[in-house]
Amino acid sequence: MARVLDGAAIAAEIKSEVAQEVKLLAEQGIRPGLAAVLVGHVPASEIYVRSKVKTCGELGLFSEMITPPETVTTEEMLALVADLNAREEIDGILIQLPLPPQVNAKLLLDSVVPEKDVDGFHPVNAGRLQAGRPALAPCTPAGVVQILKRSGIPISGQHAVVVGRSDIVGKPASMLLLHENATVTICHSKTRDLGAITRQADILVAAIGRAGFVTPEMVKPGATVIDVGINRITDLAEFEKFFAGDGKRAEIFSKRGSTIVGDVHPKAFEIAGAYTPVPGGVGPLTIAMLMSNTVRAARMRRGL
Ligand code: NDP
């Protein structure tokens, strides 16, 4: 039976450490602060941002939600970020994606000062991460490494195969695993004979954005499988393809009309030695690492 890596429990552990750190900083008169910018009304984004702000409150961080209208211009957003860059009580700036098409997302993300870039998306932080310098690393990949470490899964010397090369997940995950001394292979949509490579993985990280893409034949028996994917399925035939015979899921699906599946087919988890479920695996780590990054930014900005 494969071991389930409980992301929610690990996230709770990290959050309690962050709360502890916040208490210690309070003794020095410091309260880390996060500004979350949410443009327009994208329901999924609203849920994410609300839960980030709520978690700040639970852990004792200051937070502020800024909600420009859907029609906001790039210039207005740049002015908003410039203001947040200058404000002393703000240590972290989070700009929730996606942004409306008229806003130049790259220009805007690059305008966040690297010291407050708690999402770790700024090229300066990407460069620092690659160069092995202290950096704010992107939250989801940092969470992947925390899951492995805190579950006692060896990384050093292991062959880690990362499927996906996005700037947000795949690339930074590969870099972080490399720094942990894994031998890393990065795969993407142009990779030839993907299965032959994924089958060599001791640690397989799937960050593809395609429901159930990694099938059992692509997994080495006993491997650790980290499923970063979040894909909502609403089609009953597709549901059956992944979850036939899973009564608990069927109940959720019939109640909500949808369920979440990762980038790994649930049957592939049966081959694994350990795996992160979806939901409840990597997902909860993203917010925990955002909190951790905000406290880190607060300390780094003050030279602590
Ligand atoms: P992107 O779409 O930016 O990147 C997907 C990557 O997968 C690309 O590098 C792409 O290759 C690769 N890919 C696509 N199709 C194939 C294929 N057939 N074979 C091999 N590689 C392929 O997605 P993200 O990195 O942003 O996200 C990945 C997944 O992680 C998504 O499901 C997303 O929802 C989830 N996610 C989850 C988070 C969490 O908190 N748990 C946070 C962020 C993302 P190429 O570069 O060649 O196009």
Image (tube, rainbow, N blue to C red):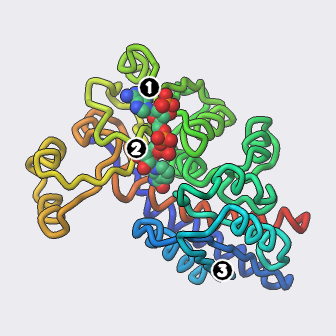
- Tell which tag, 2 or 1, sits nearer the viewer: 1
The residue carrying pointer 3 sits among few (fewer than 14), some (14 to 19) or many (20 or more) residues within 10 Å by Cα, namely: many
Identity of the residue drawn at 24% across and 52% down: 233
The residue located at (62%, 58%) in the rendering is 103
Query: Quarter of the image holding residue 81?
Result: bottom right
Mark 2 burial class by Cα count in 10 Å: few <14, some 14-19, many 20+: many
Q: Do the residues labelled 3 and 2 touch (CB within 8 Å)?
A: no
Q: Name the residue under label 3.
A: 63
Residue 254's place in the image compared with 67, above or below, is above
- How crowded pointer 1 is (Cα within 10 Å; few <14, some 14-19, many 20+) is rated as few
User: Which-is-in-front pick, marks 3 and 2?
Assistant: 3
Which circle marks residue 298 in the picture?
Answer: none
| Residue 127 appears left or right of 234 | right
Mark 1 residue's CB less than 8 Å from ligand 1:
yes
Percent position of residue 47, x then y? 44, 72
Count numbered badges in the picture: 3
Q: Residue at x 55, y 76 (%)?
A: 55
Question: In the image, what residue type sits under mark 3?
Answer: Ser
Circles 2 and 1, Cβ within 8 Å, touching? The answer is no
Question: Along the line of sight, which residue is nearer the eye, 11 or 131?
Answer: 131
What residue sits 65% from the left and 32% below the top? Answer: 178
| Residue 33 found in image quarter | bottom right
Give the Cα separation between the discs numbered 1 and 3.
39 Å
Residue under label 2: 227
Q: Is mark 3 on a helix, strand or loop?
A: strand
Q: Can residue 228 be seen at all in this image of the molecule? A: no
Mark 1 residue type? Ser
Q: Viewed as shown, does residue 299 lie left or right of 11?
A: right
User: Any mark on residue 189, and which?
Assistant: 1
